[in-house]
Image: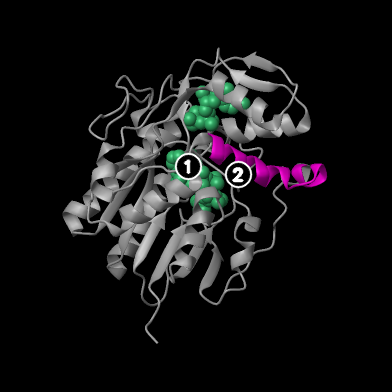
Amino acid sequence: MTQRKKVLVTGAAGFLGSHLCDRFIQEGFHVVAMDNLITGKMSNVEHLLPLEQFDFYRQDISKFIHIPGDLHFILHFASPASPIDYLKIPIQTLKVGSLGVHHCLGLAKEKRARILIASTSEVYGDPEVHPQKETYWGNVNPIGPRGVYDEAKRFQEAMTMAYHTFHGLETRIARIFNTYGPRMRLNDGRALPAFIGQALRGEDLTVFGDGSQTRSFCYVDDMIEGIYRLLMSDYALPVNLGNPDEITILDFAKEIMMLTNTEQKISFGSLPADDPKQRRPDIALAKSLLDWQPRIAREEGLRRTYAYFKGFSLEELHRMEHKNFDQYIVK
Ligand code: NAD
Ligand code: UDP
């Protein structure tokens, strides 16, 4: 029997990381999953634990990491990703984007593995160019509240390019735009889980500012396909991955109210500092390079996401608010 290719996924118990684990298992890989559970949940990967081709390590990527034997691919997804998370844990966010990526790159170099890092549309900050192309350098406030995330990701890109040019490492950089779907944490503060959670609990939907700021939301299955194709490509420069279908946050809240068939109102709050006014990916590069574009329209994606959250009882929904998985498995 031929040996399975081995892939390391960091941030594996998170929203995107857990979907990546599923995809690589489906593709016949041996998946080594690492996560320190700071924002992730064991329940996202519980279904994979019985598999002999899946190993989970509770591990802080900001500390030294090692894996015995061969390793072919690394996907570095460990990082708090929601503004309320990285505002609560700013130093860990900076560390996992800087020390964490250094550890992953060092491991990739030792193993001659190909590495893909999860960068973000936040490298464009509050963009003055619309839509955002990969050639735009961004408008980031380094010392604002979002700076801990944005600058860590910008450093991460610089470090990755340095390993590519100086050490000849095979590197890939995915600039990921807002992605949504099952396994998001209901209390992670991002717009979609916030609105769905509020609708399910019968609370008003909290729109920040006047809701005229825009985002472009990509369904998770499309994103995972884009990431997979980028990893398998031979392109080392950053590539935007996202759905260009742009919507104002106010209209988005109204869509969620229609979807959940709720009678609540919208309440307006103040806009968080440095909240980007507009965001839409230019995905021409991904289209030509990877023959990729999103296939799942927001209506369908929202329906699937709502079905996931609706599957929980009210009691379970409240339990999801807590991180109740203290146990972990190390094989
Ligand atoms: P998430 O919070 O669900 O997942 C992140 C995971 O990383 C969690 O399981 C968390 O416990 C883990 N983690 C954090 N710090 C760690 C550390 N020091 N050591 C080990 N594990 C650690 O977030 P997500 O939405 O799945 O995001 C995953 C990645 O994708 C992040 O790097 C994020 O920046 C990037 N990204 C996500 C989006 C999006 O819309 N979801 C957009 C752009 C970029
Ligand atoms: N937002 C909102 N109400 C909420 C949560 C978020 O109006 O309860 C807004 C937020 O201010 C931002 C947009 O929705 O303008 C998207 O926020 P999210 O945290 O999902 O992602 P990001 O700002 O990182 O794109």
Query: Assess mark 2: CB under 8 A from ligand 1?
Result: no
Mark 1 lies on a secondary structure that is: loop
Pointer 1 residue: 296
Q: Is residue 117 left or right of residue 82?
A: left
- Relative vertical location of residue 199 with respect to residue 321 in this rendering, above or below: above
Look at the image and say whether residue 303 sits in the magenta stretch. yes
Q: Earlier in the sequence, mark 1 or mark 2?
A: 1
Task: Give coordinates of residue 254: x percent, y percent.
Answer: 61, 22
Mark 2 lies on a secondary structure that is: helix
- Relative vertical location of residue 283 with respect to residue 22 in this rendering, above or below: above
Q: Residues within 10 Å of mark 2 (few under 14, many from 20)?
A: some
Which residues fall within the magenta stretch? 299-317
Pointer 2 residue: 304
Look at the image and say whether residue 112 sits in the magenta stretch. no
Query: Dots 1 and 2: beta carbons under 8 Å?
Result: yes
Q: 225 or 8: which is nearer to us?
A: 225
On the rendered image, what quadrant is the N terminus found in?
Answer: bottom left
**Residue at x-position 53% and y-position 22%:** 249
Q: Which residue type carries mark 2?
A: Arg
Q: 314 or 37: which is nearer to us?
A: 314
**Residue at x-position 29% and y-position 48%:** 291
Query: What is the quadrant of residue 244 in the picture?
Result: top left
Query: What is the quadrant of residue 301 in the picture?
Result: top right
Q: Which residue type carries mark 1?
A: Ile
- Relative vertical location of residue 324 with respect to residue 125 in this rendering, above or below: below
